[in-house]
Image (cartoon, rainbow, N blue to C red):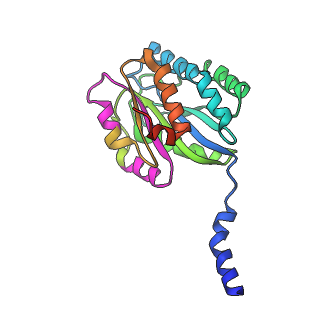
Amino acid sequence: MMAKLLTLLLILAPLLARPLAACELALVMALDVSRSVDKQEYRLMRNGIAHAFIDDEVIQLISWLPGGVTVTVSQWGGTGHQHQVIGWRHLSDRASVLSFVEELSRIERVFLWSDTSVSEALLHADSLFADNPVPCKRRVIDVSTDGISNSGPPVQAVSLGIGLSGTTINGLVVTGHRPDPVAYFYNNVTSGPLPFVVVTNSYDDYPRAMKRKLLREMAPVLGMVTSE
């Protein structure tokens, strides 16, 4: 009997040692500010994200999730051009979401005329989870861009390694550039549990596209039974 109890304790010990999750989702929003994104497109992207977060459906879902979500924002371009512009914020109700959106609406881009390194954007985004003060059940990196990587390490190997750690990598891709960024994201960037790509044809459509992506990221099971 004692031997069985000790065996059970050995099995459960790693699970008991883990901190209890205090929120549902930790989300890194990685925004492309490389040379392919002009000043107007940057403003449309930033403001579109802000509008998506203050949508009633998004706020309601955040308030329903156990412990809400934590979110941080980074900007990225080419090699060595990655910067966390908003630290981790805990969103659990309308007031906390509005406070985050107010902060988001004021951030300016930190890089100009930069190359595009998706791999370094992913590595930087993944490193930010270590500083999240609130343990969460799931980790998601949300990459927004309109192009493909043209500098830095091979993207597929980086994304695969991050995905194998249990982190989901999703994309919001604006079409129009060549080579096709949508096919590139599906083949090289998305990784981890239940990844997906939301596609939009214009930065003007960012609020709708981002809202759709946020709802699916916060409730992935719902996304599996709804149309793309």
Q: Quadrant of residue 61?
A: top right
Q: Quadrant of the C terminus?
A: top left
Query: Residue pushed farthest left?
Result: 179
Q: Quadrant of the N terminus?
A: bottom right
Relative image position of residue 6 (x, y in whole percent): 69, 81
4 or 135, nearer to the observer: 4
Relative image position of residue 127 (x, y in whole percent): 55, 46
Asked if residue 94 shows in the view, the reply is: yes
Residue at figure coordinates x 57%, y 38% from the top left: 27
Residue at figure coordinates x 43%, y 43% from the top left: 195
Q: Is residue 27 above or below residue 13?
A: above
Relative image position of residue 206 (x, y in whole percent): 46, 20
Residue at figure coordinates x 39%, y 17% from the top left: 202
Q: Quadrant of residue 189?
A: top left
What is the magenta range? 157-185
Residue at figure coordinates x 66%, y 36% from the top left: 64
Asked if residue 89 shows in the view, the reply is: no
168 or 28, nearer to the observer: 168
Q: Was residue 174 drawn as part of the magenta stretch in this picture?
A: yes
Q: Is residue 190 above or below residue 14?
A: above
Relative image position of residue 68 (x, y in whole percent): 67, 38
